[in-house]
Image (cartoon, grey):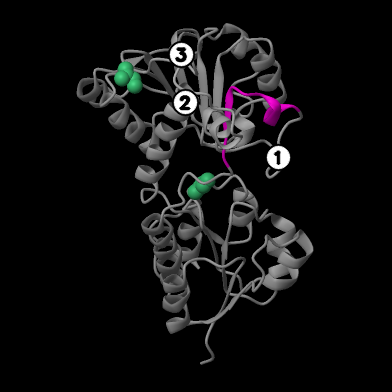
Amino acid sequence: MSRKSVYVTRAIPEENIDELRKHFDVEVNPDDRALSKDELKQKLKGRHAAISLLTDAVDGDVLDAAGPQLRIVANYAVGFNNFDVAGATQRNVVLTNTPGVLDDATATHTMTLLLATARRIAESDKFVRDGKWQGWAPMFFVGLDVERKNLGIAGLGRIGKAVAKRARGFDMNIIYSDVKPDADFEKAFGATYVDKDTLIRESDFLTMHVPLTDETRHYIGAKELKAMKKTAVLINASRGPVVDEVALVQALKNGEIWGAGLDVFEDEPKLASGLVDLPNVVVVPHIASATPQTRIAMGEIAVNNIIKVLNGQVPDTCVNPEVLKSAAAQ
Ligand code: GLV
Ligand code: GLV
């Protein structure tokens, strides 16, 4: 029997590709750039499986172009808002993501952004590099205190909890909002469950850890920014569209909040007009999970899911499990 064919839309760690090659014919996009929609359609044609990235829009059109032999698309990310989940289910294609392995890296990065914004690290680093430093001064680059301030966590999933664990080391008070409270978490972290309005109003540092869905798009908009403390900092290492970026630029310009630390943006790699001119923001290019161990572990999950599904087994991290039931019934 001929080997099954797998396409990888952009280079991921070599050890992951090597593992995949033991089982299948593998082609990897040789260019270190994201594919256009047309290229994606063309490259997936006739494949049995693909590893996709969060920059690949995997929709009905792409799945149709791939053809009915396509069994699985494994996203090399925990977020999967780039998937048309219903469209894949309809076409009997299994979709998987990479939860769990990037919680530590993402939570550490979130704390890094929080601390860097509070202590004005990007701004003062630039000041030194620009040769402007004249010597120590008492009121120079005074930032914000972090200790004993309220950390508001919007969305208490695995990553939100990992952030809370780190924030406890800085003696932060933890408040959180989600669809339902978590009594064990409250007990372990002395955390308090609040509604969204309270979270917005009371947070000194507000960090976003919700998935991007129709409900969470612009979770933070002009109204929420106005309701925040003038001394508050907004942190986002989830998905850009969770925050209305144009409204955020206005709020920062008007002093409605103190600062922002951003890993993600609404229309990556573009930034909202005026954002980079603001001194009180730290902006980094969507790198929350970018550590060697994490990136290999993400690849291992994607590769194992493909091996399992192409061998008729159940994958470890399926985002549309309905499809497995219909496959079993076939
Ligand atoms: C990164 O943003 C991911 O979703 O894994
Ligand atoms: C600061 O450098 C201090 O010694 O207080």
For residue 199, the mark is: 3
Residue 219 at x, y percent in the picture? 59, 23
- Kindly tell me whether residue 93 is visible in this rendering: yes
Residue 92 percent coordinates (x, y): 58, 62
Residue 276 located within the stretch drawn in magenta: yes
- Name the residue at 38% across, 14% down: 150
- Which tag is nearer the camera, tag 2 or tag 3? 2
Amino acid type, mark 1:
Asp
In the rendered view, does 102 fall on the left or right side of 242? left
Region of the chain picked out in magenta, as a range: 274-284
Q: Residue furthest front?
A: 134
Vertical arrangement, residue 296 with respect to residue 164, above or below: below
Under tag 2, what secondary structure? strand
Which residue is the site of mark 1? 267
Residue shown at 52%/87% (left/top)? 3
How many C-alpha atoms fall within 10 Å of the one at disc 3: few (<14), some, or many (≥20)?
many
- Residue displayed at 47% across by 11% down: 139
Q: Please identify the residue farthest to the left as the structure is shown.
A: 188
The magenta stretch spans residue 277: yes
